[in-house]
Image (spheres, rainbow, N blue to C red):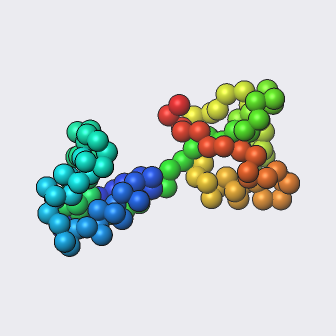
Amino acid sequence: MSKLTLDEKHRKLADCINSLKSNYLLSEVLLVAGRKLNNLHPETEALIAKIYLADGIDWITTKYNWRFKSKKIYARYISSRYAEITFFKRPFADNIMTESEFKKLLEGTGLPFEAFEKVNADD
């Protein structure tokens, strides 16, 4: 029994593959995926195979840096350091949050969630 741990961003792909699992062999799924994607990248092929062969999946929620969408604001990145919301020119590596954590942080501030965008923590 093999359990796979995946990032939440792969959920749609996993749901699609798992729906095909009972009717199609792995080679057939890979063939169709290759046609749909007009050439299957080796990393994508390996991911599809892992999902297909897994008995279950544990999901990890992605964490992001958050910033104002507007470029008119100099300090766009939000931080919750010092137990309050502050804004900085650059993001802090240790201040990444999931979407739900960020929404909770904004509660009661009057700042709309729609005014912010998520930025990959690796960027």
Residue at 67% in and 52% down: 102
- Residue 29 is situated, as x and y percent measured from the top left of the image, at 21, 58
Viewer-side residue, 59 vs 118? 118
| In this rendering, position of residue 79 left or right of residue 4 | right
Residue 94 appearing in the image: no
Residue at 34% in and 63% down: 16
Q: Quadrant of residue 22?
A: bottom left
- Residue 88 is situated, as x and y percent measured from the top left of the image, at 74, 31
Residue 7 appearing in the image: yes
Viewer-side residue, 33 vs 67? 33
Residue 44 sits above or below residue 102 on the image: above
- Residue 116 is situated, as x and y percent measured from the top left of the image, at 71, 44
Q: Quadrant of residue 82?
A: top right
Q: Residue furthest right?
A: 110
Residue at 76% in and 30% down: 71
| In this rendering, position of residue 50 left or right of residue 95 | left
Q: Residue furthest bottom?
A: 22
Residue 18 sits above or below residue 13 on the image: below
Residue 18 sits above or below residue 31 on the image: below
Residue 17 sits above or below residue 37 on the image: below
Q: Quadrant of the N terminus?
A: bottom left
| In this rendering, position of residue 53 left or right of residue 104 | left
